[in-house]
Image: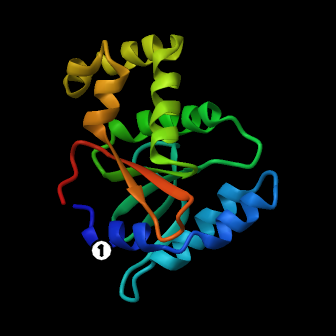
Amino acid sequence: MIRRDLIQRLLQYNYARYFMLFSRGVRGGLESWLQVELVDALQSTDGSYQREVAYPGTSQKADFKVDQDYVEIKCLNYGEPNTCCVSRYLTDLKKVDDKSENCFCVLIFVGTKENMKEAMITELATQKWSEDVIYMDRRPSFEPYKNSATAFINSNITFYDTPTSNVKIAMYRNNRIEE
């Protein structure tokens, strides 16, 4: 079971340095840097953490693991179209959905929650949605959403504010996780 305190610490992290680097136009590397920063901030004094750890029984790797929780992080990079970032996020979302381990996908975004949600709907409403439907149709949990990107996003992704006003978070947790 994913620990609520891990989620709270992720939401309370001060993303000011990320926003400063983003707004200065730093290109590339922000995601890797932010992953390391978050691992350091999220580690519990009595827990363990690892970067780039393989999911059991597969060669696929999570960005990091804190205690028993696998975390995938995507963030908007300077100069990158919103839909490009969202596309990478949705790829990670598909990767964690069929895992039995405790997983969640986090998108760190500069802008408004509305901009982020709009980018997700745009990306899913393109031809990629129909490709995703083929993938999603194999799992009953996605059946109700196969014709509606908006319904999928509204039912499965939670949007949050952070202490840094221009930085927002979208979070998806796989079905097997309880709070």
Q: Place residue 80 in its image quadrant.
A: top right
| Image-based side of 134 in relation to 131, left or right | left
In the image, residue 72 above or below residue 155: below
Asked which secondary structure carries label 1, the reply is helix
Where's residue 175, x and y in %?
Answer: 23, 42
Q: Quadrant of the C terminus?
A: bottom left
Question: What residue do we see at 43% from left, 19% from top?
Answer: 132
Q: Which residue is mark 1?
A: 5
Question: Between residues 178 and 60, which one lies in front from this camera angle?
Answer: 178
Label 1 sits on what residue type? Asp
- Residue 53 appears anywhere in the view: no
Residue 76, percent from left and from top: 63, 48
The answer to whether 29 is drawn above or below residue 85 in the figure is below
For residue 46, say whether it is visible.
Answer: yes
Q: Where residue 177 sits: x, y (%)?
A: 22, 52
Q: In this rendering, would 40 be left or right of 29?
A: left
Question: In the depicted view, which residue is nearer to us: 139 or 87?
Answer: 87
